[in-house]
């Protein structure tokens, strides 16, 4: 089975093969929808990370008070702000891993995809940010929401 680095190297070599031997000739263009040699796993990771970062930024910038106290509590509001993080971490990530493994069977294994997505999205992004917020955020409601997210993630990961 090919590693992702081997795949990227192969893509770069194929791109070099499209060039003509004549120095004065224009480079041949490939009309296929190529992703400029970037691996499908890297593209999926970038998308998942950007969605998680966006939701985490919304959480970090939240004032920690309910915007409309009559409609919902601050805890419900913070939980809804963090819901996209749960979706990316527990559902979209594993779903993307399964789709990539099925779409590129000779290139990517399911275990490789799951491990890489877990490492980059959960271990390197979501969990450290939420842990930092749970430990040091000055707003008690945000600390509570961060702690509650760990329980929610555990429950959702057990389902996935």
Image (cartoon, grey):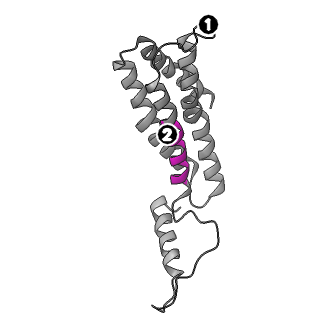
Extreme residue toward the top, this view: 70
* Residue at figure coordinates x 61%, y 45% from the top left: 96
x%, y% of residue 16? 48, 78
x%, y% of residue 14? 53, 75
* Residue at figure coordinates x 63%, y 46% from the top left: 98
Q: Residue 49 versus residue 29: which sits nearer the camera?
A: 29
**Is disc 2 placed on a helix, strand or loop?**
helix
Q: How far apart are marks 2 and 1 (CA)?
A: 38 Å
Indicate whether 48 appears above or below 28: above
x%, y% of residue 93? 57, 40
Q: What label sits on residue 81 in the rendered view? A: none
Q: Of the residues under marks 2 and 1, which one precedes in the sequence?
A: 1
> Which stretch did the figure color magenta?
41-53
Q: Residue 130 versus residue 111: which sits nearer the camera?
A: 130
x%, y% of residue 51? 54, 39
Nearer the viewer's eye, disc 2 or disc 1?
A: 1
Indicate whether 6 appears above or below 76: below
Indicate whether 68 appears above or below 120: above
Q: Is the magenta stretch mostly helix, strand or loop?
A: helix
Extreme residue toward the left, this view: 136
Q: How crowded is mark 2: few (under 14 residues within 10 Å), some or many (20 or more)?
A: many
Displayed quadrant of residue 61: top left
Q: Residues within 10 Å of mark 1 (few under 14, many from 20)?
A: few
The residue that disc 2 covers is 118
Q: Is residue 33 left or right of residue 14?
A: right
Work out which quarter of the rendered image holds the C terminus and state it.
top right
Q: What label sits on residue 70 in the rendered view? A: 1
Please check the rendered image and state whether residue 45 is part of the magenta-colored stretch, yes or no.
yes
**Is disc 1 placed on a helix, strand or loop?**
loop
Q: Is residue 143 left or right of residue 96?
A: left
């Amino acid at each position: 089975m090919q590693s992702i680095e081997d795949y990227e190297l192969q893509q770069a070599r194929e791109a070099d093969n499209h060039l003509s031997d004549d120095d004065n000739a224009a480079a041949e263009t490939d009309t296929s929808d190529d992703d400029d040699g970037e691996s499908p796993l890297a593209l999926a990771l970038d998308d998942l990370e950007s969605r998680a970062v966006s939701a985490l930024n919304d959480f970090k910038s939240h004032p920690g008070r309910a915007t409309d106290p009559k409609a919902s509590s601050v805890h419900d509001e913070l939980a809804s702000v963090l819901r996209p993080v749960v979706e990316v971490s527990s559902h979209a990530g594993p779903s993307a891993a399964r789709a990539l493994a099925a779409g590129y069977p000779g290139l990517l294994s399911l275990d490789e995809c799951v491990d890489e997505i877990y490492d980059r999205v959960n271990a390197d992004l979501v969990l450290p940010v939420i842990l930092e917020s749970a430990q040091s955020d000055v707003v008690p409601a945000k600390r509570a929401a961060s702690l509650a997210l760990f329980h929610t993630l555990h429950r959702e990961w057990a389902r996935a």
